[in-house]
Amino acid sequence: MKTATLNLRISPPLKEGIKIAANKEHRSIANMIEMLIRKHCNDSGIEITEIYGTKRESSNG
């Protein structure tokens, strides 16, 4: 699967918070942010399609 780059600026305390959360779940910061975006979209009824046009199933429901 191709990936896209997303650059963003956040406050240092928010960065530290996401770093701690990622470490607790043994994830990278990038993976943690991706997981949070997918969860938010899923909770909001926004379908995320992958490169092949199929919906990716989440591991938590």
Image (spheres, rainbow, N blue to C red):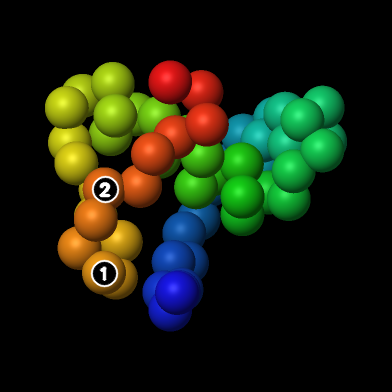
The total number of labels drawn is 2
Residue 12 appearing in the image: no
Name the residue type under label 2: Lys
Label 1 residue SS: loop
Q: Residue 27: name its quadrant.
A: top right
Disc 2/disc 1 C-alpha distance (Å): 9 Å
Mark sitting on residue 52: 1
Q: Is residue 27 visible?
A: yes
Disc 2 crowd, CA 10 A, few/some/many (<14, 14-19, 20+) = few
Q: Nearer the viewer, residue 45 or 20?
A: 45
Looking at the picture, does residue 2 appear above or below residue 58?
below
Report which quarter residue 19 is drawn in: top right
Residue 6 locus on image (x, y percent): 44, 66
- Secondary structure beneath dot 2 equals loop
Q: Pick the quarter of the image with the C terminus.
A: top left
The residue that appears at 26% across and 48% down in the rendered structure is 55
Quadrant, the N terminus? bottom left
55, above or below 39, in the image: below
| Number of other residues with Cα within 10 Å of mark 1, as a class: few under 14, some 14 to 19, many 20 or more | few
Residue occupied by mark 2: 55
Amino acid bearing label 1? Tyr
- Residue 39: percent from the left, percent from the top? 40, 30
Q: Is residue 35 left or right of residue 39?
A: right
Residue nearest the viewer, comparing 8 with 48: 48
What's the residue at 29%, 70% (across, down)?
A: 51
* Image coordinates for residue 40, horizontal then vertical, percent: 34, 29
Relative placement, left or right, of 13 versus 59 is: right
42 and 32: which one is in front?
42
